[in-house]
Image: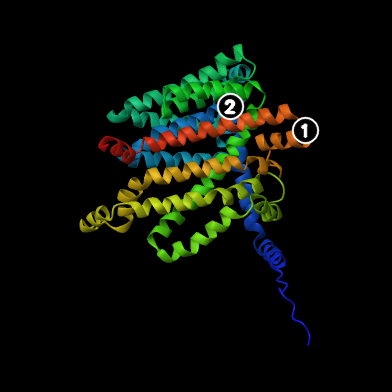
């Protein structure tokens, strides 16, 4: 009698590798496009944090002014956004903004701008400035938005004067100092003066140990990874809250994602996207996404059923009940999930640095590889500063949601 092999040899790893080969051979263009987009997004955001441009600040200021106008000036705002979007496309394809600068503007102010700022104002700056001027005009026409519009547009002008005219006179890295001040101002406006002072002091320490560029690279990578994870997690969490079958399927997958060692995620990520920031982002998204799904589902399920039934009794459709009742009431729980996603993303920066993602993770890894204690410690302190900064900001947003304020008022 021939003995039976036990336990049987199951080629699980070979099957996994075969699946990866099949996916790469059949969907290579999809992975290449995804890698290009993620790489561009990380580089663009990191570049903005390291050296913000006047056009980028103008676009952000215009967006801050435009969002509240969606309720009161929707039609003209839609027209402005459509025209500006077309101009951005024309600038990207044909350089219309550059042509305007070169052929329409007098050479004297252009040369003066280059001489003062040390850089060339390109067509994107022209389009962004036009966007800011347009929404500023719309904002001043709306009585309820005038103060906000004046503060934001005036703040943009002050930032430009400070970063491009005043700070270069007194410091060697004016853009880094400008971004440090802007991040501290953001912390102050969202979480109060104590957090603003902490951000100013802590980020100054990061810059003083020569880790500013690495910290901003890490911040860009973490924010992009967190944004992708949240955009995937929240819809899955909502669908799981609505459908018990989906919830039963998703939960074991989330358990696997949370218990699998983080290094394992790098194997397929490197196989599909090679070395660089992209596999780090992909592994971070997979590792950080489960809390967002779980807490979104929990928040939706915890909404009082009587409130949902009240909305249904008034004839509200399902999507209105979701967006008008369930999501606002579940927002504190959802934001807690977002907070956890960001914290888990930060915990992956060292592992991401091992595959060429750069930033603080690479510095920590270099400190370990070279037995360079000071380098590893300074990079570690910078990671802690970013963790506290992002944690307090998201906690303050959660604390200021309407549901959280109502609960504090009841208590």
| Residue 129 at x, y percent in the picture | 48, 29
Residue in view at x 52 percent, y 61 percent: 252
Tag 2's secondary structure?
A: loop
Q: Using a 10 Å C-alpha cutoff, classify the residue at mark 2 as few (fewer than 14 neighbours), some (14 to 19) or many (20 or more).
A: some
In the rendered image, which residue does mark 2 sit on? 121
Q: Point out residue 217 in the picture as x, y percentages from the top left corner.
A: 63, 35
Q: Pick the residue in front: 76 or 144.
A: 144
- Residue 53 location (% of width, % of height): 56, 28
Image quarter where the C terminus lies is: top left
Circles 2 and 1: CB distance less than 8 Å?
Answer: no
Is residue 409 shown left or right of residue 131?
left
123 horizontally vs 274: left or right: left
- Which numbered disc flags the more N-terminal residue, 2 or 1? 2
Q: Can residue 405 be seen?
A: yes
SS for tag 1? Answer: loop
Using the rendered view, name the quadrant where residue 379 is placed.
top right
Eyeballing the image, is 107 above or below 282?
above
Q: Which residue is mark 1?
A: 371
Residue plotted at (47% across, 44% down): 338
Q: Nearer the viewer, residue 282 or 102?
A: 282
Q: Is residue 94 visible?
A: no
Q: Which mark is residue 57?
A: none
Depth check: give the residue in front, 200 or 220.
200
- The label nearer to you, 2 versus 1, is 1
Question: Which residue is painted at 36% across and 47% down in the image?
Answer: 330
Which residue appears farthest toward the left when viewing the image?
A: 314
The colour scheme used to paint the residues is rainbow
């Amino acid at each position: 009698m021939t003995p039976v092999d036990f336990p049987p040899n199951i080629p699980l790893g070979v099957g996994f590798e075969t699946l990866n080969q099949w996916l790469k051979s059949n969907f290579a263009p999809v992975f290449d496009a995804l890698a290009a987009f993620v790489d561009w997004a990380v580089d663009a955001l990191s570049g903005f944090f390291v050296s913000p441009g006047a056009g980028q600040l103008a676009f952000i200021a215009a967006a801050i002014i435009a969002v509240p106008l969606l309720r009161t000036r929707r039609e003209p705002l839609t027209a402005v956004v459509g025209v500006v979007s077309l101009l951005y496309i024309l600038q990207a394809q044909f350089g219309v903004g550059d042509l305007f600068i070169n052929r329409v503007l007098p050479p004297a102010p252009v040369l003066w701008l280059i001489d003062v700022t040390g850089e060339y104002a390109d067509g994107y700056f022209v389009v962004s400035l036009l966007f800011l001027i347009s929404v500023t005009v719309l904002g001043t026409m709306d009585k309820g938005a005038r103060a906000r519009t004046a503060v934001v547009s005036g703040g943009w002008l002050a930032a430009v004067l400070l970063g491009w005219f005043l700070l270069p006179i007194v410091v060697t890295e004016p853009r880094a100092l400008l971004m440090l001040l802007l991040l501290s101002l953001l912390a102050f406006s969202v979480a109060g003066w104590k957090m603003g002072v902490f951000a100013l002091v802590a980020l100054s320490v990061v810059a003083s140990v020569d880790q500013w560029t690495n910290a901003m690279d890490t911040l860009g990578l973490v924010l992009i990874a967190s944004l992708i994870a949240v955009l995937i997690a929240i819809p899955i969490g909502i669908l799981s809250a609505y459908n018990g079958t989906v919830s039963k399927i998703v939960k074991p997958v989330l358990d696997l994602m949370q218990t699998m060692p983080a290094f394992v995620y790098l194997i397929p990520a490197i196989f599909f996207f090679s070395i660089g920031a992209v596999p780090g982002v992909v592994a971070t998204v997979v590792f950080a996404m489960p809390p967002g799904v779980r807490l979104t589902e929990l928040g939706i399920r915890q909404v009082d059923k009587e409130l949902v039934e009240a909305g249904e009794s008034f004839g509200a459709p399902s999507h209105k009940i979701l967006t008008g009742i369930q999501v606002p009431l579940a927002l504190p729980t959802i934001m807690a999930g977002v907070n956890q996603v960001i914290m888990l993303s930060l915990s992956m920066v060292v592992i991401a640095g091992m595959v060429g993602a750069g930033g603080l993770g690479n510095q920590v890894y270099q400190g370990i590889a070279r037995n360079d204690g000071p380098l590893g410690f300074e990079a570690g302190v910078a990671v802690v500063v970013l963790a506290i900064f992002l944690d307090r900001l998201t906690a303050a947003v959660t604390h200021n949601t309407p549901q959280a304020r109502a609960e504090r008022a009841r208590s």
